[in-house]
């Protein structure tokens, strides 16, 4: 039987040994020294930019003009302008549609379906399917967007040739559907891999018992599989919802058009802050996006921690 190990001894000034409170025996001061580089990087690339955006949102800062040289403090005016701006609300609802369609329904549904169908498969078929799905995930956004523009092109597009529908302008007539399908195809790999690992932890004996009891396929999923992987489902939903909410890749396909019909919030911020030069207003909208992300994260974490 393995013997329990005691914490490391640390010498004191009186010569008596005392036990350190941490397993490595470093103490708080030495541990803090090791953590300092990581904390500095976090402060430089996460904390400071976030605080800077909050500050900019309270000013009328612009890329050019007098407001660029001498920005003035305007308080909550930018926030009030945003929540009374119809374009902001239009982008918000388009973003909700984008998240529900491509993340919650698309990536979760397709990722779980692929993982469920491949759970008992072995050999070449499984490796090929997983490889193709992961390839779509790891390819650079610029390359993937170029391929999809070629696929959906009105005149020489591959999709129109396959469907026998020449002249169909998918990106103009169905912009939201196009970016939803694109993002579903692109991001399914993460859900597939996460659910594949989760399904491997479901006891086969439980599924066999359910089959012997006459449970249908849906009943097995509902009563056996889903309760076992509930934590994985909620974690996956949280991550891909936040990623999709802040995703900028739709701009590469439609640039928010036509007429703002696919202008999700990430694209809206880019247009008003960089193309329009209104950095203060753009920072205020970014602050609202941050608050929405926090609300979504807290909601999912509460579900994750609840027993039912």
Image (spheres, grey):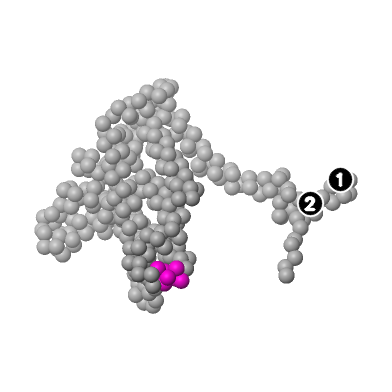
The picture places residue 245, in percent across and down from the top left corner, at 36, 45
- The residue segment tinted magenta is 204-210
- 103 left or right of 37? left
- Residue for point 80% across, 54% down: 9
Q: Dividing the picture into quarters, in which one does residue 194 lie?
A: bottom left
- 145 left or right of 59? left
Front position in the image: 60 or 77: 77
Q: Is residue 205 magenta?
A: yes
Element carrying mark 2: strand
What is the C-alpha distance between the residues marked 2 and 1? 14 Å
Front position in the image: 174 or 305: 305
Circle 1 is placed at which residue position?
Answer: 13
Label 1 packing within 10 angstroms: few (<14), some (14-19), many (20+): few
Determine the residue located farthest toward the bottom in the rendered image.
Answer: 123
Q: Main secondary structure of the magenta part?
A: helix
The circle drawn on residue 19 is 2
Element carrying mark 1: loop
Front position in the image: 149 or 32: 32
Count of all numbered marks drawn on residues in the image: 2
Note whether residue 131 is visible: no
The picture places residue 190, in percent across and down from the top left corner, at 40, 59
Against 298, is 144 above or below? Answer: below
Mark 2 vs 1, N-terminal side: 1
- Residue for point 76% across, 50% down: 20
Quarter holding the N terminus is bottom right
- Residue for point 45% across, 47% down: 303
Q: Dividing the picture into quarters, in which one does residue 4 lie?
A: bottom right
The picture places residue 5, in percent across and down from the top left corner, at 75, 61
Q: Nearer the viewer, mark 2 or mark 1?
A: 2
């Amino acid at each position: 039987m393995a013997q329990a190990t005691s914490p490391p001894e640390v010498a004191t000034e009186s010569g008596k040994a005392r036990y350190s409170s941490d397993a490595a025996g470093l103490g708080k001061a030495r541990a803090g020294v090791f953590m300092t580089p990581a904390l500095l990087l976090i402060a430089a690339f996460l904390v400071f930019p976030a605080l800077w955006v909050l500050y900019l949102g309270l000013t009328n800062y612009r890329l050019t003009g007098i407001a660029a040289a001498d920005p003035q403090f305007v308080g909550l005016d930018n926030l009030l302008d945003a929540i009374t701006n119809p374009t902001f609300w239009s982008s918000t609802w388009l973003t909700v549609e984008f998240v529900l369609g491509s993340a919650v329904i698309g990536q979760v549904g397709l990722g779980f379906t692929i993982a469920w169908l491949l759970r008992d498969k072995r050999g070449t078929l499984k490796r090929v399917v997983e490889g193709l799905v992961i390839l779509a995930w790891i390819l650079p956004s610029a390359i993937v967007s170029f391929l999809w523009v070629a696929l959906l092109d009105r005149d020489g597009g591959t999709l129109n040739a396959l469907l026998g529908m020449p002249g169909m302008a998918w990106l103009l007539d169905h912009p939201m559907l196009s970016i939803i399908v694109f993002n579903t195809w692109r991001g399914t790999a993460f859900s597939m891999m996460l659910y594949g690992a989760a399904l491997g932890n479901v006891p086969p004996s439980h599924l066999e018992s359910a089959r012997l009891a006459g449970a249908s396929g849906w009943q097995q999923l509902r009563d056996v599989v889903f309760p076992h992987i509930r934590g994985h489902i909620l974690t996956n939903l949280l991550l891909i919802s936040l990623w999709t909410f802040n995703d900028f890749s739709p701009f590469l396909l439609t640039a928010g058009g036509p007429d703002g019909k696919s202008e999700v919030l990430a694209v809206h911020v880019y247009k008003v802050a960089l193309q329009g030069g209104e950095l203060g207003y753009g920072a205020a909208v970014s602050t609202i996006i941050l608050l929405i992300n926090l609300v979504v994260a807290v909601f999912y974490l509460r579900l994750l921690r609840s027993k039912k």
